[in-house]
Image (cartoon, rainbow, N blue to C red):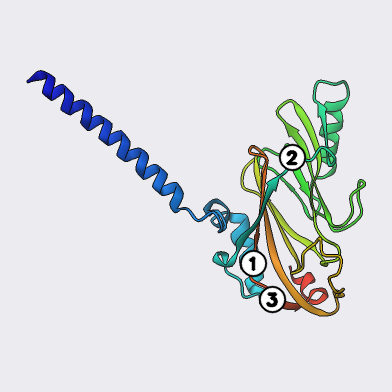
Amino acid sequence: MKKVISYLAALLIFLTIGFGVYLNINEKLSIDRTKIPEKVETSKGFQKWITNAKNKGFEIEADEFNLIEENEVYNTKWIKIYSLDEPGNKEILDKTLQEHQDIKKVVFSPNDREFIDYRTEDRNGLAPNEARLYGQREDKILDARILDCSIKANCYFDRAYFLDNDVFVISEISRTIDKKDETAIDCLPEDECQYSFKLHVIDLINNKRFVYESTSFSVVLSVVLPEL
């Protein structure tokens, strides 16, 4: 009798664990990876951004964004890594962090040890269509051209914000053309063209960048940029 009870108890435990694993897998499968992650959608940065866009006349909703691209973040061509232990590097880090305080279109991570510089101007060897990530990660100093966008598409980085010290978002407005399409017809910022918003969600821990695109809309870029 005791053996039967022990067997039934073991079977019950096995079934309970199995059911728990099933529910966990089922929950993961039910998450729509083609949509903006909940962590992004519910963040203060995203809510502030989309509220501002709506107030400026854009008809835009979070569930209208769809995943269009997924790739790795780090590219040895665009990144420089320095040891914090090398003489003078700690001083350079602290000086650079201090110099970028209180600058418009430069945002700092929650721990204030990294920043994103998405200014639309030439600076520090960067073009207006390039964003920079700089700062301390563990015992290293990271200096990366973390993102660029297509000049032919009249791209413009309008907002950036950290979700935590490892994940951040950069939003972009640009024409709805393939950035690799050299045959695309030019459209000046002063002309009315089809545009869309792109959200670049960058995960440094997992070395991933996810790009979500909104539905398209017709605007004159030079008119709406001052509003963003």
Q: Which residue is mark 1?
A: 214
| Residue at x 33%, y 39% (from the top left corner) | 20
Give the amino acid type for the residue marked by disc 3 in the picture: Phe
Q: Indicate left or right for 83 with 10 as reference.
A: right
Q: Nearer the viewer, residue 226 or 194?
A: 194
Quarter occupied by the C terminus: bottom right
Q: Indicate left or right for 103 with 202 as reference.
A: right
Q: Which residue is mark 2?
A: 114
Alpha carbons under labels 1 and 2: distance apart: 28 Å
Graded by Cα atoms within 10 Å as few (under 14), some (14 to 19) or many (20 or more), the crowding at tag 1 reads: many
Q: Earlier in the sequence, mark 1 or mark 2?
A: 2
Alpha carbons under labels 2 and 3: distance apart: 34 Å
The answer to which quarter of the image holds residue 138 is top right
Q: Indicate left or right for 127 with 165 as reference.
A: right
Q: Earlier in the sequence, mark 2 or mark 3?
A: 2
- The percent position of residue 194, horizontal first and vertical second, equals 74, 75
Q: Which residue is mark 3?
A: 217
Q: Find out whether the residues at labels 1 and 3 contact each other: C-beta distance under 8 Å.
A: yes
Q: Nearer the viewer, residue 107 or 157?
A: 157
Graded by Cα atoms within 10 Å as few (under 14), some (14 to 19) or many (20 or more), the crowding at tag 3 reads: some
Q: Secondary structure at mark 3?
A: strand
Closer mark to the observer between disc 2 and disc 3:
3
